[in-house]
Amino acid sequence: MNVLGFESSCDETGVALVRVETDQPPRLLAEALHSQAAMHEAYGGVVPELASRDHIRRVLPLARQVLASAACSLGEVDLVAYTRGPGLAGALLVGAGVAVALGAALGKPTLGVHHLEGHLLSPFLGGEVPRFPFIALLVSGGHTQLMRVDGVGRYALLGETIDDAAGEAFDKSAKLLGLGYPGGPALARLAEEGDERAFALPRPLLHSGDLDFSFAGLKTAVATQWRKLGPAPSPSVCADLAASTQAAIVEVLVAKTLRSLKDSGLKRVVVAGGVGANRRLREALTAGAARLGVQVFYPPLALCTDNGAMIALAAAMRVQAGLDQGTRVGAFDVRPRWPLGELAAA
Ligand code: KG4
Ligand code: ZN
């Protein structure tokens, strides 16, 4: 079965084709992606209306590109998947509209996928795939969650952020330092040249005893330090502040993840979402997990951030697990706010 997947929940238009065969792991046949980051940079963040319009411009050329590079005709597509939520309503509607229209035209079923399920199953497109059960650390621009994953569709939330997401903490701190949008990767690059012990920044909720996160206070602390540095801080001081910020975010993420592993006794952890591309996080988590005898799984770097492959994959895995077959109704909705816990009931 060939699954064509569309992702348009935020500022990336992603399309991909995944093949599932009985008793075989899903296989990515082709994918294409367009990032709107450069377009939104001038505004310092995602402008929802511009995002929707750009998805409309990109989605069909990307779909043609994917089918051509997989040498697959539209008639060979068996299921059309799309991100149903969470995300920006207008942006989601573009992918959903195209997918459902395509399904209706082809006489094939469509399946609306939860964006975070896409992220947390994305390591199944990597070289070494995890076995269930495992802990998943989901760290994106909009979410920071620790989950216990017992199988496809069997997710239990263990802890989450009570305010900003980890990616937001990266992005907002980067913005303060004048690093543009999205600032996470830029802040991480600058941090490579800095001393992470230079600034004493808070580690919010580090000792809270639970698995929740909070990053809003950290952003305020970074803003305070930045103000104290005056109008023209030296590049090395900027690098020190970037490194100290990254260290604070990473330390909390790693500590809570290790705690969830100790509490659950599980020996596998999956890291997914855009912040999962962060090298410092990968190093610290891999080292901490090794001390507990835990194996860490990452999606391929290119699949850490939003993409169509994870949406096609999640749909394929749901079909393979017998949880979904898609629908042929033709009507559709999107769920801009969709708690992962409601997935089973949806
Ligand atoms: O998963 P994703 O592509 O989109 C959402 O679903 O939100 O995650 C995007 C987030 C942004 O906040 C971005 O700054 C962050 O991931 N990010 C990084 C890195 N690469 C992407 N943060 C820190 N270090 C990185 N290398
Ligand atoms: Zn995402």
Image: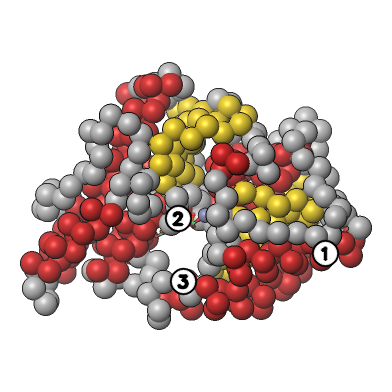
Which is nearer the N-term, disc 1 or disc 3? 3
Q: Nearer the viewer, residue 252 or 163?
A: 163
Counting from the top left corner in percent of width and height, residue 128 is at: 57, 34
Choose top left, top right, bottom left or bottom right for residue 263: top left
Quarter of the image with the N terminus in it:
top right
* Residue 158 locus on image (x, y percent): 44, 32
x, y percent for residue 62 = 69, 69
Residue 301 visible in image: no
Q: Which mark, residue 20?
A: none
Task: Residue at 38%, 70% (x, y): give it.
Answer: 181
Nearer the observer: mark 2 or 1; the answer is: 2
Q: Which circle's residue, 2 or 1, is located before the other in the chain? A: 1
Q: CA distance from mark 2 to mark 1?
A: 29 Å
Q: Mark 3 and mark 2: span between their CA atoms?
A: 12 Å
Quick check: can you spot residue 211? yes
Residue 102's disc number: 1
The answer to whether the beta carbon of the residue marked 3 is less than 8 Å from any atom of ligand 1 is no
In this rendering, position of residue 260 left or right of residue 106: left
- Which secondary structure, mark 2? loop
Mark 1–mark 3 distance (CA, rounded to whole Å): 27 Å
Query: In the figure, is residue 60 to the left or right of 293?
Result: right
- Within-10-Å neighbours for mark 1: few <14, some 14–19, many 20+: some
* Camera-side residue of 140 and 85: 85
In this figure, which residue is indicated by the disc labeled 2? 142
39 w.r.t. 236: above or below: below
| Residue 208, placed above or below residue 291 | below
Q: Quadrant of residue 63?
A: bottom right
Residue identified by numbered label 3? 46
Determine crowd level at label 2: few under 14, some 14-19, many 20+ residues with C-alpha closer than 10 A: some
Q: Earlier in the sequence, mark 3 or mark 2?
A: 3
